[in-house]
Amino acid sequence: MIRKIVFSFILISTTAVFSTANAQKTMEDLKAHKEVLKLNTKLNNLKIDLKKEQNDNAKYSADIETYNTDVGNSNDKFSNSENPKDAARSAKKAAKKLKNAQNANEKLIKSNRKIEDIQRDIEKMEAKIEKLDHHIEFDEEKSTNQNPVQDEAVD
């Protein structure tokens, strides 16, 4: 009678130990998958930001083209005239157009830097995701090789 009780206790405790270890491994796998999903979400947000910045960059480039042709045309028309007020007015307009062109160029440079930063962040994020995916695949492969009897029972 005592043997049966001791044997039952040993059987139950070993089952509990193995199921706890298996549950812990499953929790670790789920946490790793959750981390991959979070990183994928961040990666998608970075890609969206990159597209937005590329659209802004194209807009800035178009603005620069307009400003540059406008500045070129206004400088061609600028000449010494009989009336000093006209010359001063033309000089102010030319200076304003040059200032606008300079601001647009600065925006374009800033946008180009931001695009480079976002691309660098995307590359880092993809490397992290790839590393985690490889780690998860390795763990899954390792766990399936340790329990071949369970795999056969499932099939």
Image: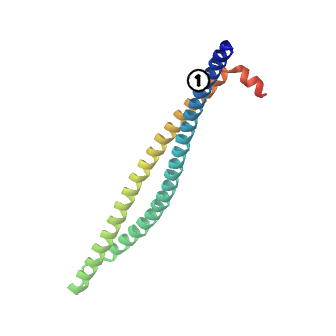
Which quadrant is home to the N terminus? top right
Q: Which residue in the rendered view is the most extreme toward the top?
A: 3
Label 1 crowd bin: few (<14), some (14–19), many (20+), radius 10 Å: few
Q: Which residue in the rendered view is the most extreme toward the front?
A: 1
Q: Nearer the viewer, residue 6 or 30?
A: 6
Give the percent coordinates (x, y) of residue 2: 65, 14
**Residue type indicated by callout 1:** Val
Q: Is residue 78 above or below residue 48?
A: below
Residue at 66% in and 17% down = 5
Give the percent coordinates (x, y) of residue 28: 54, 33
Q: Is residue 95 visible?
A: yes
Give the percent coordinates (x, y) of residue 47: 52, 51
Give the percent coordinates (x, y) of residue 103: 33, 65
Residue at 64% in and 22% down = 12
- Name the residue beneath numbered marker 1: 17
Which quadrant is home to the C terminus? top right
